[in-house]
Image: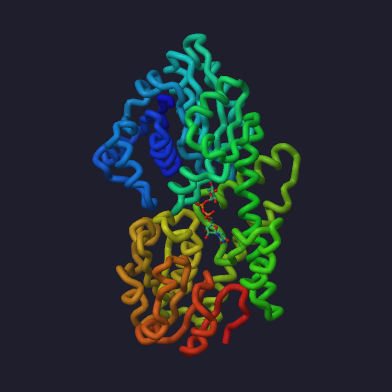
């Protein structure tokens, strides 16, 4: 078991810190934000992530997990340092590596013994080599270090489960020492015979981007199939089931919807495309996945427009679901943002409700009306639009919904309602890829 420092207490850093301490390691999570660290010391978790509070509490109580703002001291006293800072998208779509570089500099200046420097943040292929050079150039002494790329595959909303029971662990390194340090850190997973892929740094970096881009591609593919289903009278869900039975395809990530959002797919697909361009390779499939995703958001608004007979003026539109997917309060790149923006531009009124993301959306849209329940949100509305498939919405009683709405009209961008039920209760509706608009 190792003494670990994790730099960055965002969602990746926190889940990694909590998970690695649960595996028996001694972990300190550090951040430059004093408020964040103070909150964490007081048991206040800055993000909504099911199971994370409990895991943090369990491991802080056991003394294996600590929080600190003293980055230098934590680096001087650890065996492994994880870089888990943000790599936001720059205006040109590239990943912004300034935080990664700044952490690398701090590491270089504070190495006092052999240490393994490990990157968790999603970084373009070639960043590992850059960090190694950077640390070598800025080091004050000739103490050795090893570099590892250990990308994360955590889904928001199920990140704790994904960390503790991963499909695979990818470790990219150049020395056997580095592999054995990482093996020690992830010992419980080795014991459980989880697939561990030991490879070089560039391959590990490439695996992360290729996996995310492929999943995004799958979503864009099924969204395009859904659009065609609408024209030919097919049901995209049955098409997806039929396709998914083929083990080579699998039914996962074949749910059509309003387009993918979140902090990863939109950013990673763009960064992957730019990276390939830089190397003179065109990634036409990924470029198409990005374009299709943009078009999908527009298509959803067109559907709303059609349901309201191309007149949104003074209409009240209830948006149910603001986060980019259920079980998170993250609204980054959420398809709901485009929808709300277009409604406002077309002079409609927005009523909004999300079980946990109201506050996050208020930062972007402070002036729309927020509600604390779906029922209040839908009162006297002209139409209700489902943007996120929270379980709470799946359980909505359509009879009750019909009563509270001004018009029985629904745009179900996540296909959560049964078409038979919608027809039975006399709703006017549209969805994605099921060709059933009345
Ligand atoms: C993703 C990857 O799954 C994870 O491995 C990676 O490390 C980080 O990025 P995340 O962004 O949390 O995780 O969410 P994910 O569940 O992958 O969904 C991303 C987006 O795709 C959401 O907007 C979701 O609604 C959408 N999606 C997903 C679909 O529209 N259809 C699907 O079938 C699956």
**Which coloring applies here?**
rainbow
- Location of residue 421 in the rendering, given as x and y in whole percent from the top left corner: 49, 84
Looking at the image, residue 131 lies above or below residue 430: above
Residue pictured at 41% horizontal, 28% vertical: 5
Q: Quadrant of ligand 1?
A: bottom right
Looking at the image, residue 71 lies above or below residue 238: above
Which quadrant would residue 404 be assigned to in this image?
A: bottom left
Which quadrant would residue 356 be assigned to in this image?
A: bottom left
Residue pictured at 68% horizontal, 81% vertical: 233
Comparing 278 with 284, the one in front is: 284
Q: Residue furthest top?
A: 142
Residue pictured at 33% horizontal, 36% vertical: 33
- In screen coordinates, is 67 left or right of 324? left
Q: Name the image quarter holding the C terminus.
A: bottom right
Q: Name the image quarter holding the N terminus.
A: top left
Residue pictured at 59% horizontal, 36% vertical: 196
- Location of residue 268 in the rendering, given as x and y in whole percent from the top left corner: 58, 46
- In screen coordinates, is 282 left or right of 16? right
Which quadrant would residue 10 be assigned to in this image?
A: top left
Looking at the image, residue 186 lies above or below residue 373: above
Looking at the image, residue 415 lies above or below residue 361: below
Comparing 203 with 70, the one in front is: 203
- Location of residue 203 in the rendering, given as x and y in whole percent from the top left corner: 66, 34
- In screen coordinates, is 352 left or right of 172? left
- In screen coordinates, is 263 left or right of 49? right
């Amino acid at each position: 078991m190792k003494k670990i420092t994790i730099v960055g207490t965002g969602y990746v850093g926190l889940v990694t810190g909590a998970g690695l301490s649960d595996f028996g390691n001694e972990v300190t999570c550090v951040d430059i934000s004093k408020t964040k660290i103070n909150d964490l010391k007081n048991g206040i978790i800055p993000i909504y992530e099911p199971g994370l509070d409990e895991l943090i509490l369990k491991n802080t109580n056991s003394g294996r997990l600590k929080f600190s703002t003293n980055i230098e001291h934590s680096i001087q006293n650890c065996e492994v340092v994880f870089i888990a800072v943000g790599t936001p998208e720059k205006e040109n779509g590239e990943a912004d590596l300034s935080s990664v570089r700044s952490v690398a500099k701090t590491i270089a200046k504070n190495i006092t013994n052999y240490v393994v420097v490990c990157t968790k943040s999603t970084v373009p292929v070639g960043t590992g080599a850059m960090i190694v050079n950077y640390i070598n150039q800025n080091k004050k002494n000739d103490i050795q270090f090893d570099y590892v790329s250990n990308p994360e595959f955590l889904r928001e909303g199920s990140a704790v489960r994904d960390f503790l029971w991963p499909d695979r662990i990818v470790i990219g390194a150049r020395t056997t020492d580095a592999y054995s340090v990482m093996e020690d850190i992830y010992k419980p997973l080795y014991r459980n015979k989880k697939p561990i892929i030991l490879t070089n740094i560039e391959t590990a970096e490439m695996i992360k981007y290729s996996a995310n881009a492929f999943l995004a591609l799958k979503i864009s593919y099924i969204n395009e199939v859904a659009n065609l289903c609408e024209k030919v009278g097919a049901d995209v869900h049955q098409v997806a089931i039929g396709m998914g039975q083929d083990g080579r395809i699998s039914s996962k990530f074949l749910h059509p919807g309003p387009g993918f959002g979140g902090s990863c797919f939109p950013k990673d697909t763009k960064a992957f495309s730019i990276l390939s361009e830089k190397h003179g390779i065109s990634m036409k499939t990924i470029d198409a996945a990005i374009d299709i995703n943009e078009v999908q958001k527009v298509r959803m608004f067109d559907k709303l427009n059609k349901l309201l007979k191309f007149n949104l003026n003074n209409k009240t539109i209830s948006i149910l679901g603001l986060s980019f997917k259920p079980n998170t309060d993250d609204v980054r790149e959420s398809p709901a943002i485009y929808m709300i923006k277009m409604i406002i531009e077309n002079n409609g009124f927005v009523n909004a409700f999300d079980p946990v993301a109201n506050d996050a959306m208020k930062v972007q849209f402070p002036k729309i009306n927020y509600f604390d329940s779906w029922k209040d949100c839908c009162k006297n509305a002209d139409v209700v639009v489902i943007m996120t498939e929270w379980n709470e919405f799946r359980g909505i009683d359509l009879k009750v919904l019909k009563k509270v709405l001004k018009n029985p009209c629904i745009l179900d961008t996540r296909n959560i309602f049964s078409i038979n039920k919608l027809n039975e209760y006399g709703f006017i509706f549209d969805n994605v890829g099921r060709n059933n608009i009345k």
